[in-house]
Structure formats: structure tokens, C-alpha cells
């Protein structure tokens, strides 16, 4: 059976790049990925791409070449990159194509997103009185989690500190400076218990991946990274999601739990096998909860794992080794593919100062976003 | 003097001496949704129900910065913005509803505490009418 490999990776630095549009950052990332795989745009048989706020991905052909290829736009909120990758995976897995590209890019204005209630299927009153704010959801979800499992606020700070440390080792990250615990803990309280430095910000950036069938992959790289699983799931009745005027008393697991389980099943590997891990850290509380939701520990075990440094680059469970969303910001269309870029770079042993020791062979990525969806991948060399 | 009008008709009984939130109960599943005006379920398979006015605090946060306008309609600016509490309140056996809280002091809020529904002024609109919203406040008895 055909296997799907990642044979090229490309990135446009995250953060703020006033001189380039989001689309140009996407094109930059594609060129970077093509170069990495030693191929040309005209070799691409298909493309899947997405951006939430920087234009239609298929307009990239204007920048990259009018070769007539199939180019499908993907839009799935924070899972846009994951969905583009899933689509590319299926295109190759089905033997329809052998070589193609997934791309995600974005460029958001400063500050929190100002979501439109109507676009989320809600009435305007919800936004009128100040409930249409994603940061509130993040604050409330981790508030309850810390209460239920007895996790100290200090743990939130430690996660941010780690993120900025890892960002300082990543030339493509937005935030390159370390930030100490006192500064993180005492910065402005945006949404209790989360302070300013515990949140990521909307940002800019682009990422692209070249995918190939295993039959041809070695033509392009001597270390193909096998995409063993890529899954995407939406919410069930009773999961706690952003922009919810009500919730069910009967509780259900988050979409992450379902996407994650499906990914392990598809890869025939478990969370204990993952050697490099990227999970959605929209804010530092999300990293705590997503550790458990993705199966890396039980609820409540995070405090010890984090405070003892096990989630650091040289720990036994390296998480968000490129600084995650906290250090990279979140250009929605590019964010999920950034995680995959990082895992591929780690599995190739190309991350220099930020290289996970011990020649890792497996990696995992996870995105979560509004209005309650998640996409996961498992990779292996 | 202006009138007191609801920020959205159909969210809560108004005007009323004993206002209640208006939910919708699905006949086939018994599930309760809020608000009733939202089309979570079909009209044929559901009835409006008035929800309990006392519940327990399920989780909470404090909105610490001025929300962007749009969609926020509050008239405060960065200088006079006052943080406000937001939470989910579990109405026993019914549903968990999201609402603004009457306090923004973290010391006043504890998960599991009893909360009561109140209708309070959100802002004065361009006609001089008071726009009323629902909120929950820590129970006093």
C-alpha cells in the first residue's frame, strides 16, 4: 500500500513582516520547500492550501506559476493547515497523485481577534455585551481544570518561560527573547488566571510541505519523513468549546481526544512512542490540558512533569520544541503546518541548538481551534 | 426618562418582577438549550422552558481588557474601562449558561458557589433607553 512522505519543508519567518503580504509569505514558504526537495513548481501535481485572513490560497499561482495544477482552498479555522495536509495525504494515499504541496499562510492585525457573532452562528447580543472573546474561554477552561486537578498558577508561568526559551533557539520564531518567571507572572492579567505573557498573539507567517508517494520519495530526499497518520475531528455534544452561550450538563471529551485516538490507531503507535511533540498552546493553560487530552499523561500529572523539566527539549517528553504558538504567534492558516515543519526538522536532525537529543524517530502534532475542532498527525522516519 | 429594554428580546422574560432566562427543551432527548431564540433544535420537537434563577458557579474568569468594538457595544474607552467577570453557571438538572458576573473581584468568586440571576443595565443607547442584560451575582442567603 502506498505510504505518504514529507520530502520538502519550507517556512517564512513568523512574527511581523510589514514588507510582505500574507500571500507573499505563503509563496516564500512554497519556494523554500521546493528548494528543500530539489523540485520545481511545475513538478507539482496538486496543491491544497489555506489562509484565514490573507486571501485565497489558490491565488498563489500568480506568484508561483500558471502551470494549470489542481489547487484546492481549505478553510477550517485553526485546523486549516491540518486539513490541507489531510487532503494532500489522501491525494497521494489514494494513488491519484505522486507529488504535491500543502501550504498555509496568514497575516492578522494586532490584538485579540474580533470575531463576528453572526459568522459563528450566534445572535449579535452575545458580542454586544462582551462575551465574543476567545481569551475568556481559555481563561475559563483552565480555571476549571486547575481547580479540578489542583494545578498551581506557577505551572502556567513555567510553560511560557519554556516557550520563550525554545523560541530563542528558533531563527524562524517571532519571540526570540527569554522572559523570566516574575515578568510572566506579574504581567497584565488579561483573563484570569492567564496573564499577557501566557497568551500567544495573532501574527504572520507561512509554511509549506512537499509530499510524495513512498515510491518516488527517495528521488527527492535521503531522509523521507513518513506521515503515518493525519486526522481531523469536530466536537461532540457536551464538550467545552469557545463561543458557547450554553453547555450541556452531560459532559463529553474534547475533539482533541477523538482526533488523537484516531491518529494513534491509524499510525499503530501510542503516545508513549512519541519522541518529539507539538501541541496547541494558544495559551499556556492549553498546553497543560492538551498534554492529557492527547494521551501523554493523566489529568493532574502535568504539574510535576512541567516543574521537573520533562517537557523541555532535553526532557523525556519534549513539547513545543520550536516555542509553539506562544513564541511564534498564531497565523491561523500556517500554525498547524509549522508544527509539522518542526517535527520534520527534528526527525532529520537539523535543529542545531534546539535538537532533541537521541536521534528521535517519531513525532506528533496537534492543533485545536474554534468552534471545536482538532487535527493531529503522527510522523516517523 | 428612558425605557428599560432587553439587549435581545427572548433571552429572558422582560419586563418582569421575577425575570427568568428562556431555554428550549428538546422533546425527543430532554436536552435543554439556551437561548431559546437560537435554532439549536426544531420548533416542532421542542418547547420553551423558563430556567432556574439559582445555580452554582461552574467556572469563571475576569475580562481584563477592553473588548474590540465591533462586536462589543459597550461605550467605555481604554481610560474608563472596568474589568468585568464572566462565568458559566450550572442550573441544576437543566443546562450550564454563560453570563457576565456582577463582580470582577477574584476573591469573591469560587467554583461551586451559589449564584443568582439578576437583570442589570448594560448601557444607555442612542435613544436614552437603558439596555438591560442578564448576569449572575453571588447568592446572599
Image (spheres, rainbow, N blue to C red):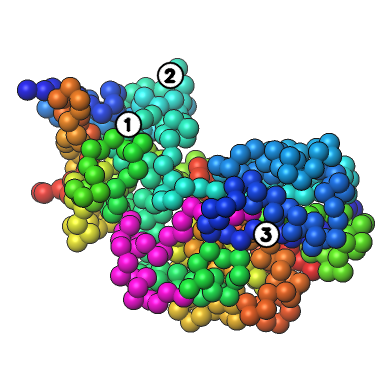
- Name the disc covering residue A125, or none: 1
The answer to which image quadrant residue A310 occupies is bottom right
Q: Are marks 1 and 2 in contact (CB under 8 Å)?
A: no
Residue identifier under label 3: A11
Instruction: Tell me the magenta residue range.
Output: A178-206
**Residue A280 shown left or right of residue B43 in the figure:** right
Residue A306 image position (x, y, % from top left): 48, 75
- Name the disc covering residue A208, or none: none
Residue identifier under label 2: B43
**Residue A160 shown left or right of residue A264 in the figure:** left
Q: Is residue A376 above or below residue B68?
A: below
Q: Mark 3, mark 1: which one is toward the viewer?
A: 3
Whether labels 3 and 1 belong to a single chain: the reply is yes
Q: Is residue A263 visible?
A: no
Badge 3 local density, few (<14 within 10 Å), some, or many (20+)? Answer: many
Judged from the image, the secondary structure of the residue bearing numbered disc 1 is helix
Q: Mark 1, mark 2: which one is toward the viewer?
A: 1
Which of the chains bears the disc numbered 3?
A
Q: Nearer the viewer, residue A107 or A217?
A: A107
Q: Say which residue appears at 36% left-offset and 24% top-offset.
A: B37
Q: Mark 3, mark 2: which one is toward the viewer?
A: 3
Q: Say which residue appears at 68% left-offset and 74% top-offset.
A: A351
Judged from the image, the secondary structure of the residue bearing numbered disc 2 is loop
Judged from the image, the secondary structure of the residue bearing numbered disc 3 is strand
Badge 1 local density, few (<14 within 10 Å), some, or many (20+)? Answer: many
Seen as rendered, the residue at the extreme left is: B1
Q: Is residue B11 visible?
A: yes
Q: Gap in Å between the C-alphas at discs 3 and 1?
A: 40 Å
Residue B16 image position (x, y, % from top left): 15, 25
Q: Gap in Å between the C-alphas at discs 1 and 2?
A: 21 Å
Q: Are marks 3 and 1 in contact (CB under 8 Å)?
A: no
Amino acid at each position: 500500500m502506498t505510504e505518504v512522505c514529507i520530502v520538502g519543508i519550507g517556512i517564512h519567518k513568523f512574527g511581523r513582516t510589514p514588507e510582505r503580504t500574507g500571500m507573499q509569505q505563503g509563496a516564500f514558504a512554497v519556494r523554500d520547500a521546493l528548494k528543500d526537495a530539489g523540485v520545481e513548481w511545475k513538478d507539482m501535481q496538486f496543491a491544497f492550501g489555506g489562509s484565514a485572513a490573507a486571501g485565497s490560497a489558490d491565488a498563489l499561482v500568480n506568484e508561483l506559476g500558471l502551470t494549470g495544477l489542481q489547487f484546492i482552498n481549505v478553510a477550517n479555522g485553526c485546523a486549516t493547515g491540518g486539513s490541507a495536509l489531510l487532503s494532500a495525504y489522501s491525494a497521494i494515499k489514494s494513488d491519484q497523485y505522486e507529488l504535491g504541496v500543502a501550504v498555509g499562510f496568514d497575516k492578522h492585525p494586532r490584538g485579540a481577534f474580533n470575531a463576528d457573532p453572526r459568522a459563528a452562528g450566534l445572535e449579535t447580543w452575545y458580542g454586544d455585551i462582551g462575551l465574543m472573546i476567545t481569551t475568556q474561554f481559555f481563561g475559563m477552561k483552565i480555571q476549571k481544570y486547575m481547580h479540578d486537578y489542583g494545578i498551581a498558577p506557577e505551572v502556567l508561568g513555567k510553560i511560557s518561560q519554556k516557550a520563550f526559551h525554545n523560541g530563542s533557539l528558533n531563527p524562524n520564531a517571532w519571540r526570540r527573547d527569554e522572559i523570566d518567571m516574575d515578568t510572566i507572572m506579574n504581567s497584565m492579567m488579561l483573563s484570569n488566571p492567564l496573564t499577557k505573557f501566557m497568551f500567544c498573539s495573532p501574527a504572520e507567517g507561512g509554511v509549506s510541505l512537499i509530499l510524495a508517494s513512498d515510491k518516488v520519495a527517495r528521488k527527492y530526499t535521503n531522509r523521507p519523513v513518513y506521515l503515518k497518520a493525519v486526522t481531523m475531528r469536530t466536537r461532540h455534544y457536551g464538550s467545552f468549546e469557545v463561543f458557547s452561550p450554553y453547555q450541556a450538563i452531560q459532559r463529553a471529551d474534547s475533539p482533541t481526544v477523538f482526533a488523537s485516538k484516531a491518529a494513534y490507531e491509524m499510525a499503530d503507535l501510542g503516545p508513549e512512542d512519541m519522541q518529539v511533540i507539538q501541541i496547541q498552546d494558544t495559551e499556556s493553560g492549553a498546553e497543560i490540558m492538551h498534554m492529557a487530552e492527547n494521551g501523554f499523561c493523566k489529568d493532574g500529572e502535568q504539574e510535576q512533569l512541567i516543574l521537573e523539566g520533562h517537557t523541555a527539549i532535553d526532557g523525556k517528553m519534549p513539547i513545543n520544541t520550536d516555542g509553539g504558538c506562544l513564541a511564534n504567534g498564531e497565523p491561523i492558516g500556517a500554525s498547524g503546518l509549522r508544527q509539522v515543519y518542526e517535527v520534520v526538522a527534528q526527525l532529520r536532525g537539523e535543529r542545531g541548538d534546539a535538537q532533541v537529543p537521541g536521534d528521535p524517530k517519531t513525532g506528533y502534532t496537534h492543533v485545536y481551534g474554534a468552534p471545536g475542532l482538532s487535527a493531529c498527525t503522527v510522523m516517523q522516519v | 426618562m428612558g425605557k428599560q429594554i432587553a439587549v435581545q428580546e427572548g433571552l429572558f422574560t422582560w419586563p418582569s418582577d421575577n425575570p427568568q432566562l428562556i431555554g428550549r427543551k428538546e422533546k425527543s432527548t430532554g436536552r435543554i438549550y439556551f437561548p431559546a431564540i437560537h435554532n439549536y433544535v426544531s420548533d416542532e420537537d421542542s418547547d420553551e422552558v423558563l430556567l432556574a434563577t439559582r445555580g452554582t458557579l461552574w467556572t469563571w474568569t475576569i475580562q481584563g481588557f477592553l473588548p474590540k468594538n465591533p462586536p462589543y457595544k459597550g461605550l467605555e474607552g481604554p481610560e474608563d474601562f472596568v474589568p468585568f467577570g464572566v462565568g458559566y453557571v450550572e442550573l441544576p438538572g437543566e443546562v450550564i449558561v454563560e453570563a457576565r458576573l456582577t463582580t470582577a473581584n477574584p476573591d469573591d468568586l469560587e467554583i461551586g458557589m451559589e449564584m443568582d440571576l439578576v437583570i442589570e443595565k448594560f448601557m444607555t443607547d442612542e435613544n436614552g433607553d437603558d439596555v438591560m442584560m442578564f448576569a449572575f451575582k453571588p447568592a446572599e442567603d
